[in-house]
Amino acid sequence: MNCCIECFKSQYVNSIISNNKTVGNCDYCKSQKVFIYKASELSFFFKGIIDLYELENINGESLENQIIIDFKEKVFSQKLIKTNNIKQLISDIIANDIDNYQKVLNNPVQLKFTKQNAKNDVNKTLFLSWDTFSKEIKTVNRFHLKNPLDLEKLKTLFKHYEKELLKGTELYRARISDNPKAYPIKEMGNPPNKMAKSGRANPNGISYLYLASDIKTTLYEVRASLFDYVSLATFQVKESLKVINLSRSTYDVFRLAELETLEEVMLHSAFIDKLEQELSKPRRRSDSELDYLPTQYISELIKSMGFDGIEFKSSLNQKGLNVVIFNPEKFKCTDVSVYEITNINLDFKKTV
């Protein structure tokens, strides 16, 4: 039985299938005249995923559904999901060792480390230590922590989230103005160090360049209101850069399974999610500079590893990304345009 490059979301697996240079019809997603691959020859990669699961009759799901949930859009394609052939594909992939996996194939399962006791054991140095670390750095010790995070483990973890920003990549930055006249290019960059106030990533007196992935996100981030004029600058990467992407879109599940590091990344994904959540929080007038200390600490750690910045989801525009750049001189402002806000849609909910 043959699967194909249309079955998976993994570039790593699809490159293996493509390099086989065999064209035919897929037995699972039903694609025709595509690169195909004998399903059982992918067993090594899938065992690294399946071995993460154990039986769980109360809170578990079928193996195929649990993989879709736990590795959203990182393992199976929507085309394959719609055919309801995932269980058959998994069975054929591990056909040579099917007896050892019969129970997890036919019963509800969940990730081994999702049980609370196990989670406490493996995550206590990272995710579960966040609150302790955060409280101490804000109110007890600033430079010599008694309850430090495991920095070596963090450094190893961050390497799996590396992303390249290619030369020529365009990102955006905005400033609200009182009139339709654009700010000059020289006034659209980051402020000089002496004027730099504390942000989620930068300490007071150290200036970083905060950019966004698209125009809409940029307008949200500056809190543009109805009839505001906004000067919007386009910044271009002068040379390819390395950043940490916190949105889980960077790592390849099958590549990590081959390297036997998938479990480690999954174990500590809650910490990455927490860091992204804290970095993406919009600034509020009521914020204290102390609120930014934990994320500033982690940002400086990433900077010390030689990375050029951090990319994370925008909390103000779900489809957008924000990027904080440690060395602004690696970007060039190429253009400034003026936009007028002509419409605003508000979503709201009752809280009291």
Image (tube, rainbow, N blue to C red):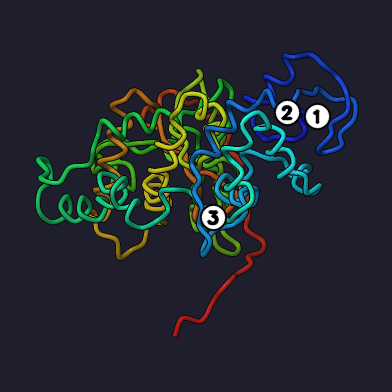
Q: Amino acid at mark 2?
A: Ala
Give the mark toward the camera: 3 or 1. Answer: 1
Q: CA distance from mark 1 to mark 2?
A: 6 Å
Question: Reading the chain from its start, which is encountered first: label 3 or label 1?
Answer: 1
Task: Please determine whether, in this image, residue 73 is positioned above or below residue 186.
Answer: below
| Residue that carries the numbered disc 3 in the rendered image | 220
Q: For the N terminus, give its image quadrant.
A: top right
| Residue that carries the numbered disc 2 in the rendered image | 39
Residue at the image point whose x is 75% and y is 24% from the top: 38
Q: CA distance from mark 3 to mark 2?
A: 46 Å
Q: Amino acid at mark 1?
A: Met
Q: Which mark identifies residue 83? A: none
Badge 2: how crowded within 10 Å, few (<14), some, or many (20+)?
A: many
Task: Please determine whether, in this image, residue 238 is positioned above or below residue 62.
Answer: above
Q: Which mark identifies residue 1? A: 1
Question: Reading the chain from its start, which is encountered first: label 1 or label 2?
Answer: 1
Badge 3: how crowded within 10 Å, few (<14), some, or many (20+)?
A: some
The secondary structure type at the circle numbered 2 is: helix
Q: Whole-percent x and y of residue 215?
A: 61, 45
Are the residues at dot 1 and dot 2 in contact (C-beta closer than 8 Å)? Answer: yes
The secondary structure type at the circle numbered 3 is: helix
Q: Is residue 308 left or right of residue 65?
A: left
Residue at the image point whose x is 88% and y is 28% from the top: 25
**Observer-nearest of 293 and 57:** 57
Q: CA distance from mark 3 to mark 1?
A: 50 Å
**Observer-nearest of 101 and 5:** 101
Residue at the image point whose x is 34% and y is 51% from the top: 118
